Amino acid sequence: MSSGADRPLKRPACPNFSSGPCAKRPGWSPAVLGGALVGRSHRSAPGKKKLAEVIERTRAILQIPDDYRIGIVPASDTGAVEMAMWSLLGARGVDMLAWESFGKGWVTDAVKQLTLDDCRVIEADYGLLPDLCRIDPDRDLVFTWNGTTSGVRAPDGDWIADDREGLTLCDATSAAFAMHLPWEKLDVVTWSWQKVLGGEGAHGMLVLSPRAVERLESYNPPWPLPKIFRLTKGGALIEGVWKGETINTPSMLAVEDCLDALKWAEGLGGLDALIARSQSNLAAIEDWVRQTDWIDFLAAERATRSSTSICLKLSDACPLEGEARASAPKRLAKLLEDEGVAYDINGYRDAPPGLRIWGGATVERADVDALLPWLDWAYAQIA
């Protein structure tokens, strides 16, 4: 077992390892919001220009195809996913993939709220991926790219058919800006600013392929759509949504904060640089796990291991049993929070007991390196 009884001397400069809202980008301060268009209408010319700039910079960094639509929508990633499901599903059968709590939430919406007639649920336990070979390309597909509460991600997009008839709806909230997304395989992609960008909450992003737009303009769902879900009028797409004319009032402070994060990402070198930073954080934890016998990854396969929501569990070699084992992650996280070393690293409430350390691009590798000896120290206190 790793020696962790000695109290470490070095602390992370930033102890924010929460998986959402996530750490702000290095060097952030409220001063970066000085240019926010507060007290002005988001429908004014300067307001629309700011919102359109978010869309333009997002497209450039994520390398989103020119013919895909990008919109800023209400209610974070949740609102974006709900908007897509309520607006697009029901035209054909749908396969719902779920391997963690948020994916299971979309299953609940499809089965119990939308009450879809032809809905197949394909699930897997925490730490595993469902059987992707069961996916039917003639059906719609809803899935999370990266399981935020399980630390299990899709390994690639090869399992999605190029000649599919159905639409793919992908919740990419903890993947966008940290992982390459195969846009040609995805028809709807959603995320929120408060994940990899470290932005503020309440705003979501919705990306639609031309195939998704065609569905929107040709299909009328049999259920009523609230105003904040409506993307068409008179059978045609509402064009303003994709130019920064938001459905409801956005926070211009949050918009300014998002622009700051996007400019920071550009300054680093764009998507590849963001991915490299996240992968470096994962590599640090992988090295530590290899040398530490009381801990292991929740993800069963390395190829599906997330570099953002890095989920850990007590290993089979850990001698703790019963209640002591079940409560160990929570007690360990509380110790480190009290020390001011790591905040919000206890596993998600619906996930198996464990730790969850955010490794997205806004987290510095040096802070991850500084955290790891403290994890050993905290374990030694409770073991």
Image: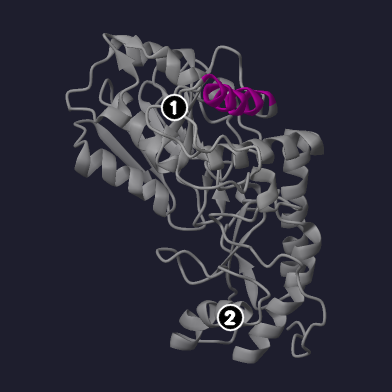
Task: Answer few, some or many: residues within 10 Å of disc 1's Cα (few below 14, many 20 plus, some between 14 and 19).
Answer: many
- Cα–Cα gap, marks 2 and 1: 39 Å
The residue that appears at 79% across and 66% down in the rendered structure is 369
Q: Looking at the image, which is closer to me, 225 or 52?
A: 52
Q: Do the numbered discs 2 and 1 sit on residues whose CB atoms are within 8 Å?
A: no
Q: Amino acid at mark 2?
A: Leu
Q: Is residue 315 visible?
A: yes
Q: Which residue is mark 2?
A: 332
Q: Amino acid at mark 1?
A: Thr
Q: Is residue 12 left or right of residue 297?
A: right
Over which residues does the magenta segment extend? 45-60
For residue 222, above or below residue 296? above
Q: Is residue 360 visible?
A: no
Residue 57 shown in magenta: yes
Q: Quadrant of residue 18?
A: bottom right
Quadrant of the drawing holding the C terminus: bottom right
Q: Position of residue 138 (x, y in %)?
A: 37, 20
Quadrant of the drawing holding the N terminus: bottom right
Q: Is residue 237 left or right of residue 187?
A: left
Q: Position of residue 49 (x, y in %)?
A: 58, 22
For residue 137, above or below residue 191? above
Taken as a whole, is the magenta stretch helix, strand or loop?
Answer: helix
Q: Is residue 60 left or right of residue 97?
A: right
Q: Position of residue 196 (x, y in %)?
A: 62, 46
